[in-house]
Amino acid sequence: MTTVKAGVMLAGRYRLDALAGRGGTGETWLGFDRDLRRRVAVKLLRAGATLDEGVAERFRSEGEAAARLNHRNIAAVYDLGEHREARGDGSAPVRLFLVQEYLDGRDLKTLLDERPGGLPVKDVLDYMAQACDALAAAHGAGVVHGNVTPANLMLLADGTIKVCDFGTAGLTRTGFQPGTPAYLAPEQLKGWRFDYRADLYAVGATLHHLITGLTVFPADDGRVPAHSMAGGNPGPPSRLRPGAGADVDRIVAALLASEPLERPAGAAQTAAALRAAGSLSRRLPEAERIARTITDPAFRASALREIGAEAAGYDWKRAHGLLAEAERDARTVTSHSAQADVLRRIAEVVAGHDPKEAERIARTITDPPTQVWALGRMAGVVAGYDPKEAERIARAITDPAFRASALAAIGAAVARYDRKRAHTLLAEAELVAGTVGDPARRSEAMQEIAAVVYDQAEAERIARGVADPERRRWALWRAAVMTAGENPVEAERIARTITDTAIRAWALGMIGAVVAGRDRDRALKVLAKAVRVAQAQPRALESITGVMAGHDPAESARIARTWGFTAQVCRVAAVVAVYDPAEAERIARTINEPPHLAEALRRVAVTVAGYDVAEAGRIARTVGDPLFRARALREIGAVVAGHDRDRADAFLSEAADVAHGIEIPLDRARALWKIGAVVAGQDRGLGHTLFRQAEHIVRTMADPHGRQGWALRSIAEAVADHDPVEAERIARSIPDPSGQAGALAAVAAVVAR
């Protein structure tokens, strides 16, 4: 509870009038600037945020940088300072405050509270595109937000979105975690330093919440860090909100990538993708035409299924017709296994809109294992929007192992909003799993149930009941990791009972990672234990060095070099590059193997590009291998493109020049078509020149391993985004009938997006 009262003056100038809200960073007050006679909003940070002088200093420097931002979608920062809060016990803690422009609007969290099932998809795409415009401007000025959430996005009466609370990122960079963990990137949850890519993750998490009404991971759950680090996947938004569409699914999946370098190149590119999403592709008829020319029925059915999936979120009637056509083609496939696979995939798409029709398709699959698998996956899809129907489908599955798996999946989905019902479903799944006759399949089913049980005592109990020793160890590993966020002592206890040394060591390493965001000292102690346990287990030790990279990079790099874990040395270098390019480069250059050295320098250069383009270019140009040098320059160009088109073009042109010097023809062609894919969006002529050069190399190269068809298909897919006719020509030139059919199906799928 705050001890600050209405009427208090900050810095003798800002009067606090009314408390507007309270969150992880502190309180937001409506206030009044006495000097300029205007209303303001004041962010009063909680006292604990200023205990570390380094945190306070970073807050000041980043607050000053935020105050220099000038963009229509950014809430202006007017001032920042310190307030000494006098308390009854005689103490007077210092509290930092930030003064922002007063906004007459409503934040998106409030709107979402009124519509818990999610806001209109088109509105969300517009809101988040505007937010990305703001982030692109900030990132171009070297400012990271660090806490993008629905509560920090204000909607004004004219439809303008304002991003609030710029200037608080300095708090998060040293381990203080503001806001709800559900929006924080994995590197933030680990307590690592981070860069603008953390904002991109937060955009993805916010998109998911605004569209589906649910956070990526349960927002009130201390297991969020564990979910994130143990490979938790929220699944596509369209499973919870069928109208979201496949393009939204792709955008969210890219933004939520666990590795920062795998996320989109920048906020500007994300804004463009969001504006292009949300409507049926105008090229859909062209995609349908290409698909229908495919002579192989399996590939034709697959292509029509892909196009139907693209259309499903926007025009279900049209999508239904395409999927029905795909089903008819699939039934003419002579291979029973191929037919079963295509029908299963069609049923999964249909399940997002018409569960009874999907069930009909699945039950016509003649291969029994594929049929029950299809029904189980269908139940998981339907659970997102109609859990009762999903339960009915699951209980109709005759195979007990698949039935138990389906019930567990439904329980996991329901747990996000009804834990009592989820508990009942998971208990039923456990009972069904106990009836599975085959010991191996019974153990597999029990392991799946233990992985999704919310109550950790229950999860441990089920895990210990898994008969297969190897599966039992991994079930206990997950139980330990998922417990760490709420009870690290209990998590360590579970980990110590794992009999396999490597798995026990890795469990301790993951517990350290989960704890690190809130208690760095404890995390380092746990990681030290993990290292001791793993001394004779290279596989576990390699994983632990990756976890340590953000907390003790010198020790992590030392262990990795000692054991020859060059991939982890690369990882350490990339982590350090977020804040110290010189040290990152030094770590990278300790690698002796040329390919690994080149990869490490590439990762460092691309990471540094987010805040120092000149230094990134210098590092990239020192990469000896032209294949990695061309890739580094291409990726830097993609990062820069969002805020400096001319500079981006220069990097991409240089990348193409370097690519022409790559010795192996296939590698040279691949480098050129990947550069062409980036360039073609801005300069179609140059992009096509690069595509043609790549195609010429592929057609004239020696091909003892039969990779020409794959390469031509890859070029056709890259071209399809920009010129469907040219892509179709390349695909039809593949001599192998099966390869040609597969390439045409791939081109049709790209054109449909």
Image (cartoon, rainbow, N blue to C red):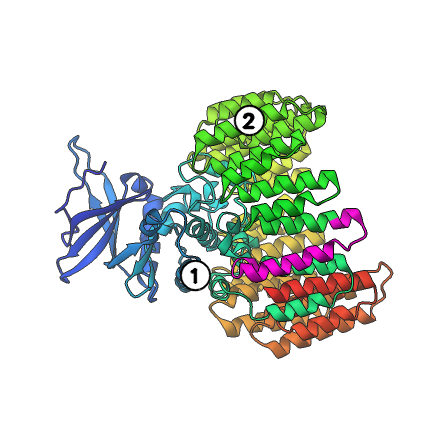
Q: Residue 384: x percent and y percent?
A: 51, 43
Query: Which residue carries the number 1 mark?
Result: 122
- Front-most of residues 574 and 491: 491
* Residue 29 shows up from this direction: yes
Query: Which residue carries the number 2 mark?
Result: 428
Q: Which residues are magenta?
A: 310-339
Residue found at x 57% / y 28%: 429
Q: Residue 305: x percent and y percent?
A: 65, 57
State which quadrant residue 5 falls in.
top left
Residue found at x 54% / y 70%: 648
Q: Secondary structure at mark 1?
A: helix
Q: Is residue 64 magenta?
A: no
Q: Residue 332: x percent and y percent?
A: 77, 55
Q: Secondary structure at mark 2?
A: helix
User: Which of the two labelled residues, at mark 2 and mark 1, occupies the earlier sequence position?
Assistant: 1
Residue type at mark 1: give it.
Answer: Lys
- Front-most of residues 449 and 682: 449
- Front-most of residues 558 and 80: 80
Residue located farthest toward the bottom when viewing the structure as drawn? 685
Q: Is residue 507 above or below residue 326?
A: above
Magenta span main SS = helix
